[in-house]
Image (cartoon, helix red, strand yellow):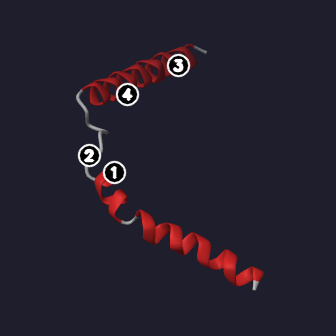
Amino acid sequence: MSVIYLLITISIIVAVLFLYAFIKAVRQGQFDDSYTPSVRVLFDDELKKQENKPQNQNNA
């Protein structure tokens, strides 16, 4: 039974460490994407044409 307590304690410690690393990465801007929005604007019209094209073919 003491092994279960040990494993639960270790798993909680590991989870807290991963949570700390995630929060630290978010605060440092690790997940900020400044490139994709600028490229998405350039190809926005092409994506809309592709989305509308299958709908027009099904209705015709």
Disc 3 to disc 2: CB gap under 8 Å = no
Q: CA distance from mark 1 to mark 2?
A: 6 Å
Secondary structure at numbered mark 1: helix
Relative placement, left or right, of 50 versus 22 is right
Q: Amino acid at mark 4?
A: Phe
Front residue of 33/58: it is: 58
Q: Position of residue 47 (x, y in %)?
A: 48, 68
Answer above or below: position of 48 versus 13. below
Residue tagged by mark 4?
18
Q: Amino acid at mark 1?
A: Pro
Answer above or below: position of 9 versus 47. above
Front residue of 58/26: it is: 58
Residue tagged by mark 2?
34
Answer above or below: position of 29 versus 37. above
Residue tagged by mark 3?
8
Relative placement, left or right, of 24 versus 4 is left
Hey, which residue is sitting farthest left in the picture? 28
Residue tagged by mark 1?
37
Query: Disc 2 or disc 4, which is closer to the eye?
Result: 2
Q: Quadrant of the N terminus?
A: top right
Query: Disc 1 or disc 3, which is closer to the eye?
Result: 1
